[in-house]
Amino acid sequence: MSLRVNTSGAGDSRERIRKYHAEFTFNSVLQNTQQPYATQEKVFESIGNGVLASMSEGLSTCVLAYGQSATGKTYTMMGTESKPGLIPRLCQALGTKHPFDIKVSFLEIYNEKVHDLLAGDAVSTLNSISSLPRRKGNARKDLRVREHPSKGPYVQNLRRVSVSDEAALLALVTEGARRRRTAATRRNAASSRSHALLELCTPRATLHLADLAGRQKEGANINKSLVALSNVISALVNTGSGRSRFVPYRDSALTWLLKDCFSGGGNIFVIATVSPSFACYNESASTLRWAAQVRHLQSPKTTPAPGVVSKADLQAQLNQLLFELGNHYIRYIPENGKITYDDDHWLLKPEVNKVECNTASAKIGPKPVIPFGNVRDVIARREQFFQPYCDNYFKYKHLPYVGMYCFHRPVLCLIDPDVMKHVLIKDFDHFQSHGIFSGGVGDPLAGHLFNLHGASWKSLRAKMSPSFSSSKLKGMYPFVESIANDALAYADARADGAMNFSDFYEKYTMEIIGSVGFGVECNGFKNDNSEFCVRGHEYFDPRSLYWTLVRALAFFAPDLFNKFKIRRINPEIIDFFYNLVKQTVSYRQNNNYKRNDFLQTLIDLKNNDSIDHKGATNTQVGVFSINDVASNVMLYMFAGYETSATAGQMAAYELALNPHVQDKARAEIRRVLAKHNGECTYEAQSEMVYMNMVLDEAMRKYPPMRALFRRCTKEFRMPNSDVVIDEGTLVFIPIQAVQMDADIFPEPETFDPERFSPERKAKMHPCHWMPFGEGPRKCLGLRQGYVQSKLALVKLLHSYELTLDGRTQVPPAIKASSLACAVDGGVWLKLKKLEV
């Protein structure tokens, strides 16, 4: 590009031309000039395809529009409804390249203040933006820019929205752009007054789209950020000669947030817009000089982001997958995308409709559907995860067990409680593994007690058992009671109204896990956007279809994970919790700080100490690393969140549905508290036997996990049978079906806590009621679970009467996407204040 140098006042009056190099130049002003007119389509073809190619290589990419006001930056980036710009076209293109697993954030920087352009009541996954309210006036909340030690700069409390379709993405971006601050100038009736930063995160790479405001006479801080941007680029370009030069990223919010883009972490595409007017000569020259300097920035790092594989690696994985399909007589035809099956192998005749545990012996089972086996409706999200096993329990009750298929894999579904007792207790050494994929290499949170088996499991369980002794639980109790008091205050604010008990118990349980397990205060009752709570909820209820399917595959096809290096958990979640534990442990050790919680017990183990059942300290050698601490803290969340939350909210639901049971429970609470001078001490809650019976009956009808699962670790011959279970076979025990069996619990739909009186419970078959599992792998923290679930109910029932709200379904419908007994629509109950 050539620019004629202004010679006015210069000593040399000869005409001079200064040349600036650019990959592309566009004329978007006059269509009748010598240079061809560039349409929005032409701009996208030239720049957009390069952006998409950069992202396909796993490189974070930044598109930066820079120039004087009224030179077409926003038009180039956003365009109009009839002539969409670069951003809408990139959104459409990403929609064709990704099965919409995209997270969106959109912010503006005005006078060095960061505002969220997507703030409002947006949900995490949108099909439209109808829930994003129009902003009234200039009401904006200033957000703070912070820097994560490993992830870099970020905006605290900035909303990130997951989208599942192209229309939602475009609508979201359009709404964010509409909210951006504008003002009228002499050249533009709606000139942008702020810098806008749009971020689109895909599973492979992140795209940053920045539309910068031009220099403004009235905006000193806007000009300051542009000067800071120039200083950063100058420092980066001039760095060399062996000495590292300070780069002033933090001089402005703009440069701080774009730090990773400019420090060699990705590709940068600069769109420099200039005016053809001679009156804008100086600004045009300044813009071109700035763009020329940007071209000298260092090349991006060639190493892709963590978890990103090359195209060649993906092709190798695809070839391996096709090979595995071929081994199972399934053929994929790339030309038409169809899958064919070998009829001789897959045709199932009625008289041989069997699922084999080995070639010698088999049991009749439900007919599988190719290629899903018996879990097609689960994959289609029409049935809850364990529903097929519960249904077949009743269909085949005349058998001790029944064969089923998860895709091509045989699964043995147990029906006879005596057979369950063999698997879980008597012959446990043949079924030591839970059988799901644990997380694999590179997941520092996967090596916890739940995922181990064999000698490593036995050793770790022996070391961790004292962590849940009565003395340890009593020491942790004040933290739980304090959070129960916070929960009561949360309910007090909603007195004489309705409250979503599902949401209430999720907040309450997550607070306990944060305090007792991780040693941090989440403040979830006051802050719905607490990062700990948001990350924790996403761990249990993935927001995207991709992570939901991956979680299902952990049960159905665990060997695929190691074969194709698939991560079971979103790496962002893993990094957050691992770094949180690591920082907390470091702080405690550096400051010689101790706290009587679960994390401290693990820190003591890491420091070669263990706590025996009497609370004494015993020295041990080589017990724990920091990864062991982090993974077993994560187990505290994994094992304690959904179990306690489900038990508590479903007990509250049944109490509201059965007032006579509620009255009896309240009478016990008031009697015991009066005995203890009104204080709900550890000893007081231990005396509330009927409340334990209420929780037991709630967990009978709504067990947190509807099935137990084991994988055969050593070949096993079924008792009194010729059937041999091969090593590696998955065994499912549909505990909800057992616990709702009328032959075991008469009138199973009736809520009757008397079933679990101490006398009757002591005589119960060990495999008739198993919400905490059974046998050597029974949950270590079951007593802590009772305390957590019970204490909030105790506080509420003492002061309130619970009644059903019209929004609660009777009977409750279970979410098809949930592993636990999560109620679709939530449990809504009314709170009526009582005289105390």
Image (cartoon, helix red, strand yellow):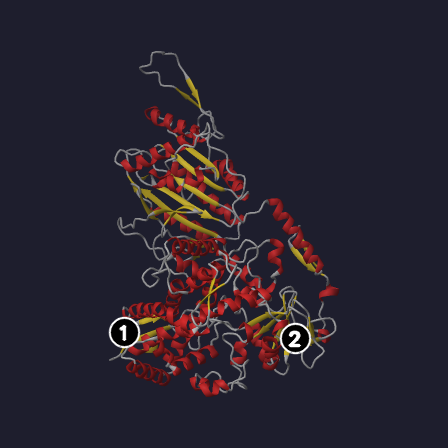
Q: Foreground: 443 or 122?
A: 443
Q: Mark 2: which secondary structure?
A: loop
Identity, as a three-letter code, of the amino acid under mark 2: Gly
The answer to whether 699 appears left or right of 324 in the picture is left
Residue 651 seen in the figure: yes
Identity, as a three-letter code, of the amino acid under mark 1: Asp
Q: Which residue is mark 1?
A: 496
> Quarter of the image holding residue 577?
bottom left
The answer to whether 763 appears left or right of 511 in the picture is right
Quadrant that contains the C terminus:
bottom left
* Mark 1 to mark 2 CA distance (whole Å): 52 Å
Q: Which residue is mark 2?
A: 365
Residue 287 lies, in percent from the top left, at 38, 29
Local crowd at mark 1 within 10 Å, few (<14), some, or many (≥20)?
some
Residue 267 lies, in percent from the top left, at 49, 38
Residue 469 lies, in percent from the top left, at 44, 72
